[in-house]
Amino acid sequence: MANPASFPRPAYGWYCLGVICFAYLFGFMDRIIVGLLTPAIQADLGLTDSQMGIIQGLAFAVFYVLFGLPIGLMADRTNRKWLLTAGTAIWSLFTAAAGFARGFWGLFGARAGVGIGEATLNPCATSLIGDYFEPKTRPKAFGIYTMSTAFGTGLTYVLGGALIGFVGVGVANTYDMPILGTIPALQAVFIIIGIAGLAPAVMMALTVKEPARQEVIAGGSQASWTEIRAFLKLNRTTLICHHFGVAFIIMAVYGWVNWLPSLFVRVHGWGVPEFSIYYGIFGGITGIISAISSGYVTNWFKKRGHTDGAMRTVLVGGIGLTVGTSIAPLMPTPELVLAGYVLAGVFANYPPAQALASIAEMTPNQLRGIVTAIYVLVIGIGGAGLGPFAMGWVTDNVFGDPQSIHYSMALVTLVMGLLGVALIGYGLKAFRTSVARADWA
């Protein structure tokens, strides 16, 4: 076990986590702003639901995972602080670049760039958090880290909705930008959010230090390919159930996060700014509660002798999300739909937060970057990539009616959620074995 005295001062560790969370906040905002702008983009560019599903998900996810594996290796072998700083700057600049896109392929390219930059996030963050905090504090630290997604979601909806209202997003509306002059209002939203995302990159470059690596297995500071293959083979059941189980759950989450604004616009006649304010405030609050409480739930399980506490928390979250978000879109009034998603949001951050805590718990330091990158590959394609696309495709090809988006959301959520819960439940025993044989020699 690591010596607590070898970790950085707690106050400094929490500060560095705060900067990482600030970057993650903008990263998640950059991911989902497209969903909020989907009605305006479709009105402006005439894209179908299937095309928008690709822009929302696959355009981002394919490059997110392609670059994830080499970046995961870099996180295990190079300076993680500078790697994450560069990634933050890259995804912010490509978000701004989306403001200059005037067609499907232009948006596709900008989203691909966002994916490349964000590929640095989870491998670097998982490794850094493991070295800033001793083991007993990590579940809470990962909960706080994942809370950034709740902040990002809430701010995207509240501030994004307000920004859309302020600049007057619409096919014929324009906005006066400094230097650029008069540009379409839709493009201005991308540019403003992208430029703002450079702030955490500057903070990271100037104030965050690379920590010493902790919990290193005997044999050196870098893992060989033989050690990597041996670890993956030894823990294959755990990793398959963990990675693919979380991917199915996240597939549903990314799907409804991106299509929720369209549901309210099409089915219930709400405007995007109106929906954004209500969901941003209430959904953001429950998301924050979810992220913070996930660490406490894990520790509650562990205090009662469950060494698989982190994975159990993932399972609890998956069950709560599947039940809540497969019922919510079918509610008869917009208020009940909103309430359903807000209540289900209590579980939204249990899977992603404690999935990362699980990786840190069972994986030596030299392997955390690459194991996290493999996890990111699976959830990137299976979750963030296919989730939005699946809901758009089902709307176009199964129900054949844009007004049936609520049925698509309910169906995809139910099927994917049940698959994810089944895999996580099956993998609990294997995870206990993996944790039991973790050796921090």
Image: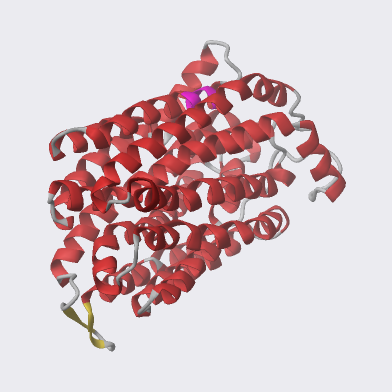
* Above or below: residue 415 compared with residue 60: above
Residue 323 placement, left or right of 230 = left
Outermost residue on the top side: it is 304
Task: Tell me if I can see residue 419 in this picture.
Answer: yes
Q: Position of residue 1 (x, y in %)?
A: 71, 29
Q: Position of residue 185 (x, y in %)?
A: 21, 75
Q: Position of residue 77 (x, y in %)?
A: 73, 56
Q: Position of residue 306 (x, y in %)?
A: 57, 15
Q: Quadrant of residue 408?
A: top left
Magenta-colored stretch includes residue 168: no
Q: Quadrant of residue 184?
A: bottom left
Residue 210 placement, left or right of 149 = right
Residue 257 placement, left or right of 354 = left
Residue 73 placement, left or right of 230 = left
* Above or below: residue 129 compared with residue 87: above
Magenta span main SS: helix
* Above or below: residue 193 compared with residue 58: below
* Above or below: residue 20 compared with residue 362: below
